[in-house]
Image (cartoon, grey):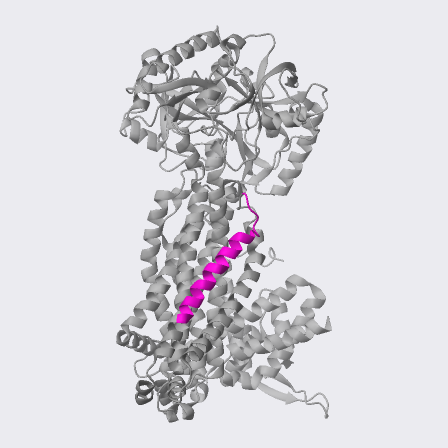
């Protein structure tokens, strides 16, 4: 298989984008992602865990996210999986972000949304 | 706290188990539950109930929604990877569905008897439910046909005074508009015989508030109302009916009560004010000037009022403002706004939708519940059929499992079959519903609000199909579950090809039968109670003899032409002359008159006042009936003591009055009231001397408690104040053409008198219980169907049980077992199920009886005889349904059965 181009993944579905975006500041575990997504979206997107992991599985399959497994202490059976962006994943989220920003510019040009000064 | 917090994760875990495909579950289940637990804890800590609710709502919708989408996309097929499609290019799940669907159709084609029975039962259940739903939807659920109907508010308490209305305009800031209508009847001249038409005198803001617009010309304006312009707007229906849709109608004029009105426009088709608000449907709209001098009396309760809330106001704000006004009015106008017992006059503000349907909502919801029960019974019945069939198909299913068919696929096949059955049932059921609604439209009483909006439309279709899917899954799930759990090796070994009905299977059938009996019992108890009430209602003695009494409503001038120069005297002479002529008509036995006769039309009432006993210690509200001599004889109202009114009583200084028994008991405590006095009126109290005593008549409805009625002589002063009255005519029998003859007689004396329907009192009494009759008849029909279905269910189950054990019975009988013992054994099984069913049904009925409390009459909702009768009936039917299979078991030829194996 030839190397995958980040352009193959654009446009991302909005939820995947938010999950990827939440990982741009470093690795997080599931709960952390849900909280970050909620915060980034201004409370508009609240994910149920089942949806989160569906999204994560998809992103892992596509090679955009990788997971690491650690145990908080030796004796505990409890495992926590942490997720981080792969280099490809980072490229994809950057591409998607700039695509969205272009779209926003267009919308602003047509006065669909107020200028950034107006919208606090 | 801890317990609940511990419960949530495990519930969530179960939810995931059900909804998610296995591979996702296997890898992430623990993580998901952990994250959920943390989110749940956060929610509890932060926002309380709503936050927790949000977490759960997302959990349910996203888990299930995502699961469904994923399966549809074919993810559920495990490691085969996403998006794999079969050769036909369809996703696997869709091709499975299509395959299952075709297979289901083939199965049913092979067993047409089974399919027809199941579809028939479902058609009945879904059809009845859909028919009732269409009524509930049209009458109660659907939005009122006005713009933004949620903000329309009805000022309850019947009619209001003009001064009150004007004060509300100033003080109730929560309203964007407050509108008034004065419903009247007027005589229209110029089209053959004088005709009485329904006029709505309205404030101009009625139209913007309720979204009325003209289809021709213009509507009534603010300027019209201020000038009291004699202009009229026709309703669309009236324009087409009376004027044949005349294109040049504007500018023409109509005569209403002798006054010419210029027609300025025609209302758009279909527009009418809500019945509860306007009191009637309107033929002609005319302007109403609320500031007119004659209207400013407090005590003239004629104006009906509604309003539209401002965008930013709530009903609570409006109610608070009204409460403030009520207190103010009680202070300022104690005479009209404080009752004799010291209660302040309150004006309840209701949402118009609630006000419109308040009376019919309970019976309708009750019918909906009843058909729901019937549908449940139908479902249980079909589940039972499927279960029996599933057992017969055990061999087929076992072979499929042995050949590698997954149990999930088999269950989904069976579920598809039941949904297909239900959909077929729904299609047939729509036919049933359509017939049902047409039949209902014939028998539903005229006063049912909004019934004209009822019909089988898209919403109703959607309801029927949704209920089909739900019932299909509902009755299919248990049989599918059991069938998919068959033990393959046992099944294949068993030579009979039938599943050797596992214990769980038998128990499930028992549960189904018992629940059918329980449901049928609940339904029948409800039906029994209402039927019993209805019978009691029809046996109520109205306090007079309504047979062969004709009532003739007479209408004088219009309501705002009170007084005038000796109008009363002229009317009195007319009435006397009329009575004279009518008593000469062949077949007429006696004739009299009163302001109002029993069961007269709504809105034609009498005088209300307060009456006090002589000492002034006790006072009650009374209905004053101005009457002519001979009224009691004509109506067949027994005179208990004293004498009737006489012509010479008119104007007598003694102020003679007849009172009812209830009133005599209240005021005179068993003593003879004759010769005693009562005081009538508060503002200008007058003493009246009791000259006679009559039984308590039912004037308005058979179920309502007696008013305190008093009868005084109809004199010309009262007559001049009354826009209408009734003649009562007792006839020798139901004489053909008599009403027409009466009409001609009246018109020969008063050619301008409009004469609405002349009616027999007995017909009106019958009509007054139409609603109850309809409700109890429908319930009775539903409960009969339920009992038949339940009996069929028991019969089928027992027959099936017997056939399952035919081998055993054959051997036992070959070994010389007693037939009575075998009958007894089968019967016992059935009786135990029946008793269990009756037990649960009783518990359910008692729990539901609170709902019935407001609908029963003359009995309580716990009426023991009704319960007893229903239990006896159902028990007998159930035992009979068990007995037939039992006898069949006993009559089996042992050799035959054994050879059959």
The answer to whether B609 is drawn above or below residue B484 in the figure is: above
Of residue B219 and residue A95, the one placed in the foreground of this image is B219
Of residue B634 and residue B482, the one placed in the foreground of this image is B634
Q: Quadrant of residue B207?
A: top left
Residue B455 lies left or right of residue B152; in this view the side is: left
Residue B58 lies left or right of residue B288; in this view the side is: right
The chief SS type of the magenta part is helix
Q: Looking at the image, can residue A13 be seen?
A: no
Q: Looking at the image, can residue B330 be seen?
A: yes
> Can residue B776 be found in the magenta stretch?
no
Name the spot of residue B823 as percent of width and height, x first.
Answer: 42, 76
Of residue B653 and residue B696, the one placed in the foreground of this image is B696
> Residue at position x 61%, y 73% from top?
A34
Residue B93 lies left or right of residue B226; in this view the side is: left
The answer to whether B307 is drawn above or below residue B782 in the figure is: above
Quadrant of the snapshot with the C terminus of chain B: bottom left
Say how many tags the image has.
0
Name the spot of residue B676 as percent of width and height, x first.
Answer: 65, 16
> Residue at position x 30%, y 81% from top?
B88
The range drawn in magenta is: B858-883
Name the spot of residue B138 as percent of width and height, x first.
Answer: 42, 48
Quadrant of the snapshot with the N terminus of chain B: bottom right
> Residue at position x 63%, y 89% from top?
A69
> Can residue B867 be found in the magenta stretch?
yes
Name the spot of residue B488 as percent of width and height, x first.
Answer: 41, 90
Residue B37 lies left or right of residue B624; in this view the side is: right
Q: Quadrant of residue B8?
A: bottom right
Of residue B792 and residue B64, the one placed in the foreground of this image is B792
């Amino acid at each position: 298989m030839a190397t995958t181009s980040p352009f193959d993944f654009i446009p991302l579905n909005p939820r995947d984008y938010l999950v990827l975006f939440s990982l741009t500041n470093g690795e997080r575990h599931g709960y952390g992602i849900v909280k970050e997504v909620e915060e980034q979206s201004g409370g508009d997107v609240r994910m149920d865990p089942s949806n989160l992991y569906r999204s994560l599985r998809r992103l892992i399959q596509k090679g955009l996210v990788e997971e690491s497994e650690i145990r908080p202490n030796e004796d505990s059976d409890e495992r926590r999986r942490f997720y981080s962006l792969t280099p490809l994943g980072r490229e994809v989220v950057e591409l998607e972000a700039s695509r969205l920003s272009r779209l926003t510019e267009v919308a602003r040009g047509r006065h669909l949304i107020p200028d950034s000064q107006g919208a606090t | 706290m801890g317990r609940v917090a511990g419960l949530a994760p495990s519930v969530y875990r179960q939810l995931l188990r059900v909804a998610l495909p296995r591979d996702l579950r296997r890898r992430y289940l623990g993580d998901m539950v952990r994250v959920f637990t943390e989110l749940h804890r956060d929610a509890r800590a932060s926002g309380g109930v709503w936050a927790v609710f949000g977490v759960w709502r997302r959990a349910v919708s996203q888990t299930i929604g995502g699961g469904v989408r994923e399966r549809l996309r074919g993810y559920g097929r495990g490691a085969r990877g996403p998006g794999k499609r079969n050769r036909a290019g369809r996703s696997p799940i869709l091709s499975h569905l299509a395959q299952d669907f075709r297979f289901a159709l083939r199965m049913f084609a092979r067993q047409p008897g089974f399919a027809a029975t199941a579809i028939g039962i479902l058609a009945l259940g879904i059809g009845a439910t859909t028919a009732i739903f269409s009524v509930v939807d049209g009458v109660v659920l659907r939005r009122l046909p006005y713009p933004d109907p949620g903000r329309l508010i009805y000022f309850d308490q019947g009619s209001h005074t003009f001064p009150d209305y004007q004060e509300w305009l100033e003080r109730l800031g929560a309203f964007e508009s407050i509108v008034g209508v004065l419903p009247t009847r007027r005589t229209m001249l110029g089209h053959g015989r004088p005709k009485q038409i329904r006029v709505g005198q309205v404030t101009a803001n009625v139209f913007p508030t309720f979204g009325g617009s003209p289809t021709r010309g213009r509507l009534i304006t603010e300027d019209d109302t201020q000038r009291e312009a004699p202009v009229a707007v026709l309703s669309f229906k009236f324009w087409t009916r009376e004027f044949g849709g005349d294109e040049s109608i504007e500018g023409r004029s109509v005569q209403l009560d002798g006054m010419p009105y210029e027609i300025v426009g025609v209302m758009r088709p279909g527009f009418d004010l809500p019945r509860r608000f306007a009191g009637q449907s309107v033929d002609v709209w005319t302007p109403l000037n609320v500031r007119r001098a004659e209207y400013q009396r407090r005590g003239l309760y004629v104006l009906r009022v509604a309003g539209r809330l401002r965008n930013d106001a709530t009903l609570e704000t409006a109610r608070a403002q009204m409460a403030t006004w009520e207190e103010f009015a009680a202070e300022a106008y104690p005479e009209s706004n404080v009752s004799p017992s010291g209660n302040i006059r309150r004006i309840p503000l209701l949402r118009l939708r609630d006000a419109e349907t308040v009376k019919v909502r309970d019976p309708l919801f009750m019918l909906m519940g009843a058909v729901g029960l019937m549908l449940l019974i139908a479902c249980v019945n079909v589940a039972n059929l499927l279960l029996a069939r599933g057992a017969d198909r055990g061999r087929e299913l076992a072979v499929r499992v042995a050949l590698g068919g997954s149990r999930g696929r088999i269950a989904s096949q069976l579920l598809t079959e039941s949904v297909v059955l239900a959909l077929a049932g729904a299609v047939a059921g729509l036919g049933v519903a359509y017939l049902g609604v047409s039949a209902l439209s014939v028998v539903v009483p005229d006063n049912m609000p909004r019934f004209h909006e009822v019909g089988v439309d898209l919403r109703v279709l959607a309801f029927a199909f949704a209920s089909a899917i739900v019932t299909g899954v509902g009755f299919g799930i248990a049989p599918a579950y059991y069938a998919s759990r068959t033990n393959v090796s046992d099944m294949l070994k068993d030579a009979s090809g039938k599943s050797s009905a596992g214990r769980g299977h038998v128990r499930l059938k028992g549960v189904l039968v018992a629940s059918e009996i329980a449901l049928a019992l609940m339904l029948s108890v409800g039906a029994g109670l209402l039927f019993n009430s209805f019978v009691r209602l029809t046996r109520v003695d109205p306090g007079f003899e309504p047979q062969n009494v004709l009532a003739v409503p007479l209408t004088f001038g219009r309501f705002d032409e009170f007084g005038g120069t000796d109008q009363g005297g002229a009317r009195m002479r007319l009435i006397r002359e009329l009575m004279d002529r009518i008593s000469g008509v062949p077949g007429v036995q006696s004739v009299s008159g009163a302001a109002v006769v029993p069961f007269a039309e709504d809105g034609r009432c009498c005088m209300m006042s307060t009456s006090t006993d002589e000492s002034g210690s006790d006072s009650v509200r009374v209905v004053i009936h101005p009457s002519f001599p001979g009224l009691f004889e004509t109506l067949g109202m027994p005179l208990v003591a004293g004498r009737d009114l006489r012509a010479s009583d008119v104007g007598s200084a003694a102020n003679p009055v007849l009172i009812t028994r209830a009133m005599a008991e209240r005021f005179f405590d068993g003593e003879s009231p004759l010769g005693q006095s009562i005081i009538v009126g508060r503002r200008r109290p007058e003493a009246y001397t009791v000259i006679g005593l009559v039984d308590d008549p039912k004037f308005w409805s058979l179920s309502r408690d007696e008013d305190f009625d008093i009868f005084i002589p109809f004199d010309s002063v009262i007559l001049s104040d009354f826009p209408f009255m009734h003649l009562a005519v007792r006839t020798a029998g139901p004489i053909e053409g008599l009403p027409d003859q009466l009409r001609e007689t009246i018109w020969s004396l008063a050619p301008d008198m409009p004469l609405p329907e002349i009616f027999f009192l007995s017909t009106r009494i019958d009509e007054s219980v139409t609603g109850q009759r309809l409700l109890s008849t429908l319930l009775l029909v539903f409960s009969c169907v339920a009992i038949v279905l339940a009996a069929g269910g028991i019969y089928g189950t027992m027959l099936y049980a017997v056939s399952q054990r035919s081998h055993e019975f054959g051997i036992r009988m070959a070994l010389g077992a007693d037939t009575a013992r075998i009958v007894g054994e089968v019967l016992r099984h059935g009786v135990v199920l029946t008793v269990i069913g009756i037990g649960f049904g009783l518990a359910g009925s008692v729990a539901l009886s609170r709902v019935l409390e407001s609908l029963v009459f003359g009995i309580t909702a716990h009426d023991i005889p009704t319960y007893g009768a229903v239990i006896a009936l159902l028990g007998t039917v159930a035992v009979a349904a068990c007995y037939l299979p039992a006898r069949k078991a006993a009559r089996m030829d042992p050799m035959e059965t054994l050879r059959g194996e």
